[in-house]
Amino acid sequence: MKTAARISALFMFIGLMSFSGVAAAQYAPPPPPPPPPDAGPEAEPPPAANPLPLPASPHVAPPPTAQPPPAGRCGVPQAPPCYRPPSRYRPARRFWRLGLYLGAGGGGFGIIGAKGPYEHISAGGMANMWVGLNFTRRFALELGFMGSIHNEQFTEYDGTYWNENEMMLWGVTLDAKFNMVAPGWRRRFVPYLQAGIGAYGLLGDSYDEYGYVGTQTLASGAGVQLGGGLDIYLTRWLVLGGRLLYRGIVLGKMDCGNTTDRCTADAEDSSTVLHGLTAEINMSIVF
């Protein structure tokens, strides 16, 4: 009995040792690869084998994976046509208006200098109106009409009696206007330069050898305008402004048929040259 028990224990011990050796051989790491035959003593060691990936931690979220978009959405290749709703974006209204504009203003006409039959013409009040066309935000053309009332002093009879003749200086002008800055929502004060030419005339009482004839054009000629001003855009269509212009005017010879008129002398029967300065406040409407 004791002999049989010892033999059984011996076989069990041998079996356990065999099983443990097989398990150790199965789970042992593989041996490193042999070095290449050409590797010398200074050759770099071979790279270590990639370690096995660690198991995912329960506290770390897995990396996101790209999800394919569902079929039929806009932008997916080979998707059926879909409806795009209109955008809610509304572009801002353009401040500047191209096209016609009308204006009118009033002020004074000062005489800087004069020479000729009407060299004693006085300063007076003036009014004008114009129609303009904006070609760009900076350039425009204006066609205008102006009229100013003046007094001209002349002698009657033997030179001992003085009288004043009221006359009107009129002009039809064509001017080019250049804005120094482009008007906009944040630029409502717009200075500008202006230059042009015009046809002028002097309207007043006329006399002949029989006396008073009536009111007619006494002289006519041409002139130039040069100056500038400032426009203040109250709204997109309403503009308040002011400008200052130099006007150089040359009027033709007069027909002095009346001996009582001051231009009967031969020395005075010549052209009239006027140098004037007009200042005005105006208002214009942009269509």
Image: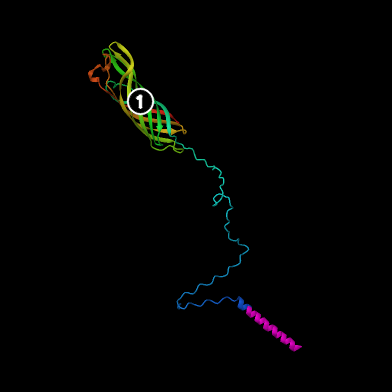
Residue 59 is left or right of residue 109, and the answer is right
Q: Position of residue 200 (x, y in %)?
A: 32, 24
Q: Quadrant of the N terminus?
A: bottom right
Q: Residue at x 39, y 33 (%)?
A: 140
* Residue at the extreme right: 1
Q: Main secondary structure of the magenta part?
A: helix
Q: Is residue 99 left or right of residue 162?
A: right
Residue ranking furthest to the top = 210
Q: Which residues are magenta?
A: 1-22
What secondary structure is marked by label 1?
strand
Residue at left offset 74%, top offset 86%:
5
Q: Tell me the residue that label 1 is attached to.
A: 172
Camera-side residue of 235 and 22 = 22
Q: Is residue 55 left or right of residue 112?
A: right
* Position of residue 122 measured from the top left corner of the image (x, y, whole percent): 33, 22
Residue 70 place in picture, x, y as percent: 59, 53
211 vs 127, left or right, is: left
Indicate whether residue 126 is drawn in magenta: no
Residue 193 figure quarter:
top left
3 in the magenta segment: yes
Give how far across and how far down residue 152 sits, in percent. 32, 19
Q: Quadrant of the C terminus?
A: top left
Vertical side of 2 occupied by 23: above or below: above
**What amino acid is labelled 1 in the image?**
Val
| Disc 1 residue crowd, few under 14, some 14–19, many 20+, Cα 10 Å | some
The answer to whether residue 217 is visible is: yes
Q: Nearer the viewer, residue 278 or 223?
A: 223
The residue nearer to you, when weighing 26 against 58, is 26
Q: Could one spot residue 248 in this view of the protein? A: no
Nearer to the camera, 46 or 173: 46
